[in-house]
Image (tube, helix red, strand yellow):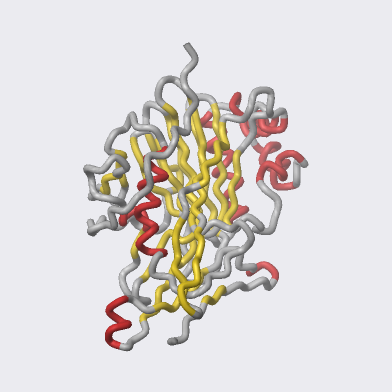
Amino acid sequence: MPLQFLRWRKSLDGPKRFLGFAFLLCAFAAASLAQGREEEIVANLAAGRVIVHVAIEGIVFATIEQSAEADSVAPRVISIDSGHIGILLGAAQWQIPAGSEPIFVEKKLPRAGSAASLTPRADGLVRLEDENADLELIGVAFLEALRPLASQLHHKVELGPDEPLLEIVVIGHAPQSYGPEIWLYEYRMVQEAIRGDYYQTRVLRPRTTQLYPPAKHEPRTMVEICYPANSAGPSLVERIQRNDPLISRLASADPRFARVVEKIQAGKANGAKASAAADFLRAVVVPLAGKARFAVGTLSERGGLEWLVPPEAPIQKVKREKEDKEGPAEAPTLRPKPKP
């Protein structure tokens, strides 16, 4: 049996702490088995923070990379439809074999025509075929894109307890006047030993969690997601609640920022103005990010996506590829039925 292994690279030395990571998976593709050659499968993980503030007349969001490695990937922002964006964390970029052109998960989406189809566009974004369709189509489409990639992993992969292979944060405005919404899709995998150290890898249907709006009577505050989940350091909301020196300094410098901070501390973040919330988030993210890559944007119900600080990496053109058509049955709807 040829050598296969999993390697996680981490650096935990002081200010250069590597919260993101990359994994290197060595496996045999079918053609390589026939020729007796080994091909590396490399998946660079997008690690970092996603911060979302639902404000008056708009949603403000930021991504911060938490990795200093040359081959790391910043959280990847994609447009899903006119009302929603997705932010990918985890195994968002693959190279099969190592050194080849990167394969982005969203560019492996199923072809148009199936019930769970997202259509890649020439500008590198993706578009939901039926913009009125329920959000479970997004989860199914990305599942079909991820399965063929993960199926090539044939060695035991040691992820952390309950750690997803891929996460997608979906942010946007629900149709039928539901208002702003934030969903988290978590894709986990299971492995079955076939013979010896040779495993079959299968990605499970995503676990979906509604992060916003909160339950009735719960405080409305910022939403923050970290990958990996045990990333060190306080969240931005924790900094705001304890009014740490950075927050205090910004609030003292601009009365608009002071009002945003007051709304968040009172659990009424949705009462802040979107323009002030956007300027505040940009002002606070710059020192938090340091030398790491970051992006700040807004998403309005009418105006769509606008960048205050665009992602550093350019958007690449989509290469359409034939996809594995295997997929699960239709998932139950994520949204509650409208009240009569």
Image-quadrant location for residue 82: top left
Q: Nearer the viewer, residue 58 or 229?
A: 229
Task: Describe residue 184's horizontal placement relative to residue 161 as left or right.
Answer: left
Question: What is the x, y in percent for residue 87?
Answer: 46, 48
Image-quadrant location for residue 319: bottom left
Position above or below: 193 against 319: below
Position above or below: 72 against 283: below
Q: Nearer the viewer, residue 78 or 138?
A: 138
Look at the image and tell me whether residue 337 can be seen.
yes
Figure label count: 0
Residue at the limit of the structure toward the right, as seen here? 242
Task: Describe residue 246's horizontal placement relative to residue 101 as left or right.
Answer: right
Question: What is the x, y in percent for residue 333?
Answer: 44, 32
Residue occupying the point 58% across, 39% down? 280
Position above or below: 83 against 21: above
Q: Nearer the viewer, residue 128 or 330?
A: 330
Question: What is the x, y in percent for residue 178?
Answer: 47, 23
Residue occupying the point 41% across, 36% down? 135
Question: What is the x, y in percent for residue 189?
Answer: 50, 59
Residue at the limit of the structure toward the front, as seen here? 195
Residue occupying the point 60% across, 67% down? 18
For the N terminus, give its image quadrant.
bottom left
Residue occupying the point 58% across, 48% down? 225
Look at the image and tell me whether residue 99 can be seen.
no
